[in-house]
Amino acid sequence: MSDSGPEAPPDPQRERELEALLALSRRGRAKLERLHEVLTSPGHFGTGATPSTVVYRENKLRLLRLLDESGQPRRGPPVLFVPAPVSRYFIMDLLPGRSFAGFVAAAGFDVYIADFGTPTREDRFADLAYYVDGLVRRCVRTVAALTGESSVNIVGYCLGGTLSLLYAALYPSTVKRLVLLTTTVDGDVQGGIAWVAHRMGLAGESYDEPRLVPAAEVKSWFEMLSPGSNSVVGRVSDLWDRLDDPADRLREVRTMASWVDDVVPAPGRLLAELYRKFGPGVNGLMAGTATVGDRLIDFAQLSMPVLAVSAEKDTIAPPEGVDAVRRIVPQVEVLRLPGGHVGIVAGRAAAALWKRTVEFLGSGGSQGVAQ
Amino acid sequence: MAEETAKTESTLVERWLAEQQQWQRTLLTYLDSVVKNDDFLVHLGNAMRGSLLAGKPYPSAPAAGAATPENAADDRLDRVLFALHELQGQVQDLRLTLEELSNRDKKRGKKSKSGKHKDTE
């Protein structure tokens, strides 16, 4: 005979609470298991998705030439992609099926990508002339030498677009067609990375005694542009919410994160020069006072067709500052696409930009270009 | 089928116990990866900062001397190194110019050969 009386019937309210807690526990565990699966998955982080070969090296720069399925260089009109030197190049060639450069290559072009690499301390002395009149110019010369073409198509992205625009104005006869993606030309337009960097003290960056601006500092400027992303709590909370997504989707997010979060240190002299020449108040690109080295830039020299693309929801390069290019380059075609700074080149809706770019590059009698 | 029936028939307490065991397994999996896979710890650290960045740690404050040299000798060395990089570029320019000249000569040679060939025809 037991001391205790008959077992009390379960309290339905309490049972419901415990069931809910159990479901919560299972969901949290599933998220952690998915995170483990993603973190242990192999991937191509930090490299492009398309097979390529290095055709030129200088300092940290590598010039990559995309290869076809048989491992051979493609035959077609050459296109040089110039990404921003403060971020990694592989945003242009992110994932199989999500590669801007791969798409252009598949359309029949011989595609090259400039990978500026990761600057180290001595590169803090690199200025605008080093990039425009040095690295970009020698990339173009190398492409011309390899293909036998006297002029090449250039696609510049973000700050890479600024370098491309300046290069094209200095050496117009070597540029067949120019595409500028989310490239700010009007430094007086508020918002955007240049404005934030100005507010965060870029004005104090020394040209004569430059430092290598740490990646964490450059990253903090980008974080200032997207509310919540500059707090660890906000980022962890976002990631936790995302862990409900399927593992495949998370792997894509991871690849994108491997670009977004992998900001490289920036040469302080370059940033100081960009700020002093093109930044708020001076606005040299719009004012016609821009120089590279001691050479004055004259946009009237830009005789080639130019396509400038802005993104409606771009917080890094506000569309007004991009579209302003029509005030300095008369023959430019300005296209504004829905999406953000990264989304229009590598997001799920990026195909609109890729197709328009191929149309633009392919027009004008290019041979071997499949549409 | 029998398993399914067993699942539906298990009590709340039993399901909680099973869940606890699953948690132990999950944590052991993490522990196992931390021990066996060096990269995993970096990736886990990034995830704990809210990032899925792979292959390297999330950007953080650089080590002392990474942004600017700590003494004058290092500064001079950096200047020399960068000057060498600039020289490397100039040498590459020279090489490219020589290649262009050589290619131009080849093209001219071909043209003149084909011209002569036509003349003889």
Image (cartoon, coloured by chain):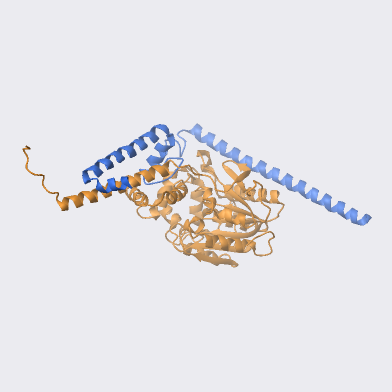
Q: How many marks?
A: 0
Task: State whether residue A90 appears in this view.
Answer: yes
Query: Which hue belongs to chain A?
Result: orange
| The N terminus of chain A lies in quadrant | top left
- Point 40% across, 48% down: residue: A220
Query: Which one is in front, A28 or A74?
Result: A28
Residue sitting farthest toward the front? B2
Note whether A370 is above or below A203 in the view shown. Answer: below
The percent coordinates of residue A325 (x first, y second) are 54, 64
Q: Residue furthest right?
A: B120
Q: Is residue A364 above or below residue A15?
A: below
The answer to whether residue A291 is seen in the rendering is: no
- Which residue is at the front of the view, A22 or A329? A22
As rendered, which of A213 and A361 lies closer to the eye? A361
| Residue A140: percent from left, percent from top | 64, 51
Q: Nearer the viewer, residue A339 or A11?
A: A11
Quadrant position of residue A117: top right
Q: Residue B113: horizontal and vertical position, in percent?
A: 87, 51
Residue A192 is situated, as x and y percent measured from the top left of the image, at 44, 57
Q: Is residue B34 left or right of residue A125?
A: left
Q: Quadrant of the C terminus of chain A?
A: bottom right
Chain B image colour: blue
Whether residue B30 sits left or right of residue B91 in the image: it is left
